[in-house]
Amino acid sequence: MRRKVLKIELRRAFFNRRMAASLLIGCGISILHIFHNLLRYVAQWNEMAFELKGRLEYPAHVFNHWICGNTYNLEGFLYFVILPLLAVLPHSLSFYEDRKNGYIRQVYTRSDREIYLVAKYVSVFLAGGAAVVLPLLVNLCICMTLLPGLPPQNAAGTLINASVLWYTLYEKVPILYVLLFLIIDFIFAGLVAGLPLFLSFYSERKSVILLMPFILHIFIYSVCMMTALPSAVEYAPVYFTFAGIGCPSGWLLVGYGLAYFAIGGVLYWLVGKREDVF
Amino acid sequence: MIIEIDNISKQIGKQTVLDHISLELVSGRIYGLKGKNGSGKTMLMRAICGLIRLTEGEIRIDGECLRKDISFPHSVGILIESPGFLNYDSGFRNLRQLASIKGIASEERIREVIARVGLDPADPKPFRKYSMGMKQKLGIAAAIMEEPALLILDEPTNALDESSIQKLKQILQEAKEKGTLILLSCHDTEDLLKLSDEVIEIQEGRVISQWKVEQV
């Protein structure tokens, strides 16, 4: 029964118009990044192929020129600013809608509260993570076909240095570093997508439920930007989830992860288990 | 099946919506709940389904205490207020999906109940394009498709025409003969008398009378 409810929820989460819209926006930004930033480097590479000798410039490569590879591309920054919207859009509103239209009663009386609540959280988490990471993967794959996978050089203008986690991995096996960040982004997006589940108990407006994680995201970013400490900005998710900037501390990941899970997962579970269904 | 409702009360804020109700309901009978809007009929149905927490008292279904021993009745079909389905799926797909949870109703059975309530099982129209009457019929089909031991129907005649009410009556009679315990509510007293064996009158959250239709 548990598996069947999960299967239904996963089907609902992945095959719906909102998921398509989220992927379309994400992939749109990621393709725009290719046209806006990458094609000139491809041209540069073609040109350099004839005159590599004697040039001191380290050539452009996948790991510092894909959408999360550096901080100076507009699309990458934009993507991580709107990340909560992309994560929430696919399936996070469905809990609110199920409660409002009475579908939840149909499922509760056929399975169990706990089974439905867990299936809903898992499906929302996976859909949110996938909606955010798939466009990044598309961008990475296209970049890999256009630029060479040269090992990153610290002296060639990268922000990944000894002050961030896994910097040696970045220099030695950059593809693993990139994959590690895609996993972090997946988990972070999944946790963000879970936040509206808890909000659904208290808000009557879809727009509030949909926008609240985004507003929280921007609020944290703004607070970090305004703080006098120069490194405070790195504590905003906009930055520490960005592979090209790096994460300054593992505790940051654990802290945000626990806080978001406590709201989106634990509180949602506790309230959902006890609430009256009308 | 025996449902023992033992002195239950439900308070929402300062308002008492169910006030010390005690009843015993047995299978093979149709109980009609009668009362004005806001009298507590729907809330009593929600309580029997296990959808709400009680402030006081307990409900036992075949000796098992609801929300303690079991979260919901083991075998229950419900139609409470508006029937909730996925808007973008057809009636058949909606029912097939719900039926897959328990795995009791076959596709053949789903087609049969959809036709039985007067809908076309092959109709590809998504649920959101259904009329009120069609939605209600699909809600009834969902409630009966797994042949539950307990059937709870809140205002099942809403938006139904006369011939559909006749069909519903047949469906309920058949379910009753199979030993289903049926609890329904209706605004229209005439419809309620047509459909029920016993009528339970509720006023301001209290049971004020309970009588057999044949005695009237």
Image (tube, helix red, strand yellow):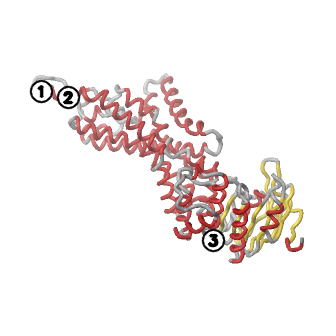
Q: Is residue A173 above or below residue B95?
A: above
Residue A52's disc is 1
Q: Which amino acid is tagged 2?
A: Pro
Q: Nearer the viewer, residue A13 or A222?
A: A13
Residue A201 or residue A238, whichever sits in front: A201
Q: Is residue B45 above or below residue A190?
A: below
* Image quarter (top left, top right, bottom left or bottom right) of the N terminus of chain B: bottom right
**What chain is tagged by disc 2?**
A
Query: Residue B207: horizontal and vertical position, in percent?
Result: 86, 62
Amino acid tagged 3: Glu
In the rendered image, residues at marks 2 and 1 fall on the same chain: yes
> On screen, A63 above or below A266?
above
Instruction: Specify the quadrant of the image occupied by residue A31.
Output: top left
The residue that disc 2 covers is A59
Please, what secondary structure does the residue beneath circle 2 have? loop
- Label 1: chain letter: A
Residue A168 appears in view: no
User: Element at badge 1?
Assistant: loop
Circle 3 residue: B147
Give yes or no for contact between labels 1 and 3 (Cβ–Cβ under 8 Å): no
In this view, the mark in front (1 or 3) = 3
